[in-house]
Amino acid sequence: MEDVAQTARISRVLLYRNFDTKRHLYRAVLASVTDEFVAEFQHQDMADIRRHGGIVRVALGIARRHPDAFRLLWRHAAHEPAFAEFARNFRLVVAQYAEAMIAIDGRVTDPQMRRWCATTLAAHLLEGICAWLDDGDPAHDDEYTVLQVCGLFAMVDAWGEPHPPDWVPRPP
């Protein structure tokens, strides 16, 4: 908590006035980024967000505004017993949103496969954003967004294709 107070340039007393424990602070950080996700995506038209790559643009914007909180939520919270449920719920909500978007497309019709696809897309998107935060130049965020959108659509296209390439083993 001392390090947090120093980084925030506030006194420990002021920090403890707002957060009784490190656990409360951690939860508040997670809640702030998830609340922003919910607020952003509730006000977006799903067709528009698909058409214009908005899902990547909006998620990256949130991650850029709160990079440490975003990494904490996506990469670390699931491994902390006190916050694993919080992280699981976030992943579930993101996957449900992705599943609704895939359903609009209509290429993946089996419900179980659609759920798997949605979970995979959500993981690819959010881990991709973390990797971009780690290594990407913010000046190239637009290029990243285009590549990420193309990758997400390519995945859905591949899953919806009834004929895999010749080198892919076919199920019996």
Image (tube, grey):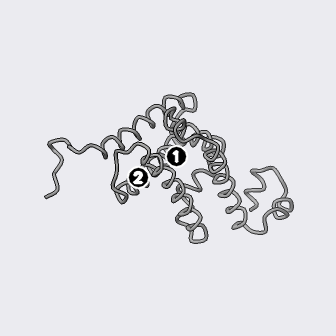
Residue pictured at 38% horizontal, 54% vertical = 114
Give the numbered dot on residue 120.
Answer: 2
**Relative vertical location of residue 94 with respect to residue 106 in this rendering, above or below:** below
Find out whether the residues at labels 2 and 1 contact each other: C-beta distance under 8 Å: no
SS state under label 1 = helix
On screen, residue 11 above or below 159: below
Q: Position of residue 97 (x, y in %)?
A: 51, 51
At a point 71% along the width and 66% down the height, the residue shown is 22
Residue that mark 1 sits on = 130
- Residue type indicated by callout 2: Thr
What's the CA distance linking mark 2 and mark 1?
Answer: 15 Å
Q: Which tag, 2 or 1, sits closer to the chain's start?
A: 2
User: In the drawing, does residue 39 fall left or right of residue 165?
Assistant: right
Q: Is residue 123 above or below residue 87?
A: above
Between residue 113 and residue 67, name the one nearer to us.
Answer: 113
- Mark 1 Cα shell of 10 Å, populated few (<14), some (14-19), many (≥20): many
Give the percent coordinates (x, y) of residue 150: 41, 34
Q: Given the current orientation, which residue lies at the most extreme bottom position?
A: 81
Residue nearer the viewer, 147 or 140: 147
Residue 67 placed where, x, y %?
Answer: 62, 46
Position of 3 relative to 142 (above/below)? below
- Which quadrant is home to the N terminus? bottom right
The mark found on residue 18 in the picture is none
Q: Secondary structure at mark 2?
A: helix
